[in-house]
Image (cartoon, rainbow, N blue to C red):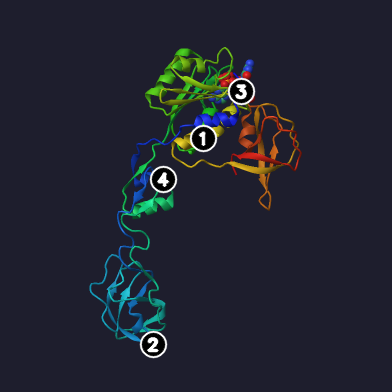
Amino acid sequence: MALMPVDEALRRILEDAAAPQEPEMLPLARTSGRVLARDIKALRTHPPFAASAMDGYAVRAGEASAGAILTLQGESAAGHGHDGALAPKSAIRIFTGAPVPEGADAIVIQENTDKLDDGSVRINEAPVPGRYIRDAGIDFETGKVGLEAGRLLDAGAITFAAAMNHATLPVVRKPRVAILATGDELRLPGEELGPGQIIASNTFGVAALAREAGAEIIDLGIAADRMEALDSAIDSALAQGADVLVTIGGASVGDHDLVQKALTGRGMALDFWRIAMRPGKPLMSGRLGGMRVLGLPGNPASSLVCAHLFLEPLVTRLGGRPDPDRMKKAILTKDMPENDLRQDYIRADLATGPDGTLSATPFDRQDSSLMKVFADARCLIVRPPFALPAKPGSTCSVLVLRP
Ligand SMILES: Nc1nc2c(c(=O)[nH]1)N[C@H]1C(S)=C(S)[C@@H](COP(=O)(O)OP(=O)(O)OC[C@H]3O[C@@H](n4cnc5c(N)ncnc54)[C@H](O)[C@@H]3O)O[C@H]1N2
Ligand code: MOO
């Protein structure tokens, strides 16, 4: 089977990936970071009445010239409006957010008045009509769409939804991503290691990436390189309703690389296996019933690069979020050799110059087993297949991993 180009692989993985139709209803307090599944309309108008924007006096502008003395008629506070209309030659004490009494058309701020001993109010500076009055409905009106489906529920959106009087919101269900590490050599962080054993590390990075993209993680732990172990993990993913099963390791051609065999044995239709990229060549994609399957290579840098390139956009789509644009242009600081047929993702440092120009410095060691190098990387320099040698100062494309 020829190696599949990266773009074609991504296109196939994302082909029909979309948010599920059926939304999940959540109490407002738990919607932070979720995606709105439906348009929501205002259930009330706000402000519901003309309201004062300042502490001062509600007056008739025509009667409140500088030097005018007005009778204090009463008070309008937030939550306790004044009953009845403003009488002639009078002022009503008013506070921020309180209803403007009928008949008043201006607010004189407190600082521009003096309260006289007999209780009346002297106006020192004439108000501008309408100034400091917020008309009813200037924010939003009953029945109008306030927030649209697809909106990420951030602080502003949640405040607005609450003000529209929504106690619960329909949100896109989180895609369920099951993650399975495979390999006899693997143990969990914190465990005692025997001879030949290593830590299952990249599972945690892949899970973190998927979670940040909006997934709910189903941790399937570690399966040994035996068909029964793999079969029962696959069954567990199905039983738990995973939308995506991510396997890590066992993707290559070795005698112990059984993942694909186990999956096809369980009924997976293989879409493709092996792509023209480095690291990440043995990536596999398929479907097992309604469950998508992504088989990542076991080498840590390979699995993380594949997770950034394929899993993150897939989870993003399934969760109804906008596709992230992580590609930027940068200036190379070092020579890069000619490339072969595999698109390279070179772990590199990234610096921002005073004028905002990015410069990318590839690390010397690019072995796909190296975790410190990956953790140090701020970007991946993307080298297309058959790219010509590149000189320092030339422009390259980078996938930004972190600022
Ligand atoms: N004859 C060939 N050999 C290999 C090829 C090939 O084309 N022909 N491809 C190589 C490439 S490229 C990669 S990448 C690896 C991928 O192999 P697998 O996906 O089968 O991965 P494993 O053999 O299971 O593991 C590789 C390496 O990574 C370690 N590992 C596995 N899982 C984890 C984990 N969860 N956390 C940390 N480290 C993990 C494992 O111990 C191995 O050291 O195949 C090449 N071989
Ligand atoms: O593609 Mo492998 O991921 O080169 O190490």
Q: Position of residue 318 (x, y in %)?
A: 44, 35
In the rendered image, residue 94, in percent from the top left (x then y), is placed at 32, 73
Q: State the image coordinates of residue 230 (x, y, percent, origin top left).
A: 46, 17
Q: Secondary structure at mark 4?
A: loop
In front of the other: 242 or 151? 151
Query: Horizontal placement of 168 versus 202: left or right?
Result: left
Specify whether residue 95 is in view: yes
Q: Residue at x 38, y 81 (%)?
A: 113
What's the CA distance linking mark 4 and mark 1? Answer: 20 Å
| Mark 2 residue element | loop
Q: Is 264 left or right of 402, judged from the image as shown?
A: left
- CA gap, disc 1 and disc 3: 22 Å
- Mark 1: secondary structure: helix
Q: Does the residue at mark 3 contact the one at mark 2 (Cβ under 8 Å)?
A: no
Instruction: Compare marks 3 and 2 and give the one earlier in the sequence.
Output: 3
Mark 4 or mark 3: whose residue is earlier in sequence = 3
Q: Which residue is mark 4?
A: 32
Q: Relative to 71, is 169 above or below?
A: above
Q: Quote the CA–CA distance across marks 3 and 2.
A: 87 Å
Label 3 neighbour load within 10 Å: few <14, some 14-19, many 20+: some
Q: Amino acid at mark 3?
A: Leu
Horizontal relation, residue 96 to residue 227: left or right: left
Which residue is tagged 1? 312
- Compared to residue 227, the image places residue 287 above or below, namely below
* CA neighbours of label 2 inside 10 A, class few (<14), some (14 to 19), many (20+): few
**Residue behind mark 3:** 3
Q: Residues within 10 Å of mark 4 (few under 14, many from 20)?
A: few
Location of mark 2 (residue): 67
Q: Residue at x 54, y 22 (%)?
A: 272
Q: Nearer the viewer, residue 53 or 205?
A: 53
Which quadrant is the C terminus positioned in?
top right
Q: Is 151 drawn above or below residue 132 in the view shown? A: above
